[in-house]
Image (tube, rainbow, N blue to C red):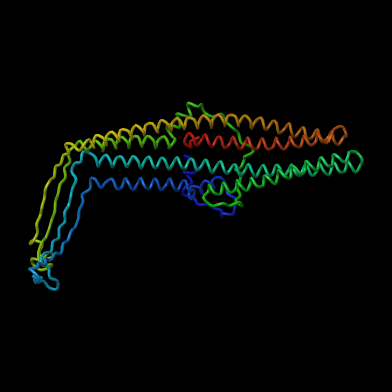
Amino acid sequence: MHPILLLLPLALAAADTAPVTLDEALAAAAKANVDLLLSATDRDAAGVEAYASWAGILPRLDVQAVFENNFNSSGQTLTITPVSLSPVQYEKIIVTTPSNIPIFDGFKSWANIERFKLLVKAADKQYDDAALNVAFDVTSRFYDLVRAERSLKVLEEAVARSEVLVRRTDELYQAGRAPRSETYAAQVTLGNDRISAEQQRARVADARVALSLALGRGADPALEVVPPAGLDRTTFSEPLSQESLVDLAKRTRPLLAANQQRILAAGQEVRAAASGYWPSLQANASYGRQSPWLYGTYGVYGDFSQQFGVNVGVTLSWNIFEGRLTSANVQRANVSERRAQLQAEQALLQVTGQIARARSSYLTLSVSARLAEENLKAAEENLKLAERRYDAGAGTQVEVRDALLNLTRAQLTLLTTRIDAIIARADLNRAVGGVL
């Protein structure tokens, strides 16, 4: 099960202004992410429909009361002849309690009950899939922020190295061992590094806002994160084959399970539509009391052994022909069932594509990360060699500047490929259902 599903009941231990870990970010998103909350309302709505579907088989009981008085007129004179009743005069008071009890409706009600039960299961699975998507989005944005902050640190280190180069070049110029032009060139390099660092600060702020919005906290450019321990020592293992991953997704991806439940629900919709071909049977019962008096021995609310009437019956109805409406309803339901099947097939194709892309990306990036580690080591050795040659007067400042630039690029490349590989693996995990 994906971590976000396990962390739903957890509360954040730190305040909003404190740095957050990945687990804390996932827990916060599980509580406040708008997309996940919207999916929860869909699930609740499905539950309400399932609750209401029982109305087709449960009896209905109504209570009716009628207080009636007659006024008659003759010619121009209105004659009112009330029956003596104190303190209110009425000619007739009627209280009835009719009840309708469904017995058989062609299995329509039971089909609807089963259909909405299946739709509730589908909504639950859809919510689980939304949780997977939110978890991946939060994970991706979390690592985007980590990458942005680490990249800023690399660029700030590049600025520090360029400052050292400017001082060394100026010292060599003062000693008459280097032309003034090399000092200017070193200053240009320093200026470019400072510009890159400042631009990266803006990217860090953007990444913080993006993660904050994913957590449902509103834009917070001051949000800070705690990178997972051992991030720089992450190892990338070989993933399962494409076929194995697809088979795993068929068993564990909530989206695919939700579509299967919708197919079954569509079958129940066909069954409910076909109920129009069957007769319906309903039991009717009513208990009524009628009297000109409200209370007393013969009053409506008097002796219950007096002034009452009971009606019990069974109604059988069978619609032999209704202008082909039942046939049309069955055809509509069949079309809906076929549509649900096609949507399930389309979702499986999309999941298969997601797995293929994520797996390929993960393989490529994991190999690139290993190559970037070797490239960084070579860049570090090249810088040491260039500095020794420059100090000994055998090299040029151009060699040192190129070595510095290559070192910075190697550091950024390794950082980017390593984090991209982690995100690609998280994407692959989401595609198969969060079980990797």
The extreme bottom residue here reads 87
Among the 4 quarters of the image, the one containing residue 87: bottom left
Q: Residue 356 placed where, x, y %?
A: 51, 29
Q: Position of residue 102 (x, y in %)?
A: 19, 45
Q: Specify whether 124 is left or right of 286.
A: right
Identify the residue shown where x is 55% and y is 35%: 425
Foreground pick, 199 / 435: 199
**Against 308, is 106 above or below?**
above
Q: How many numbered circles are shown?
A: 0
Side of 149 where 59 appears, left or right: left
Q: Quadrant of residue 195?
A: top right
Q: Find residue 128 and report its horizontal and vertical position in percent.
A: 44, 41
Judged from this view, the residue extending furthest toward the right is: 176
Residue closer to the observer: 118 or 200: 200
Q: Position of residue 273 (x, y in %)?
A: 26, 37
Residue 74 lies left or right of residue 154; in this view the side is left
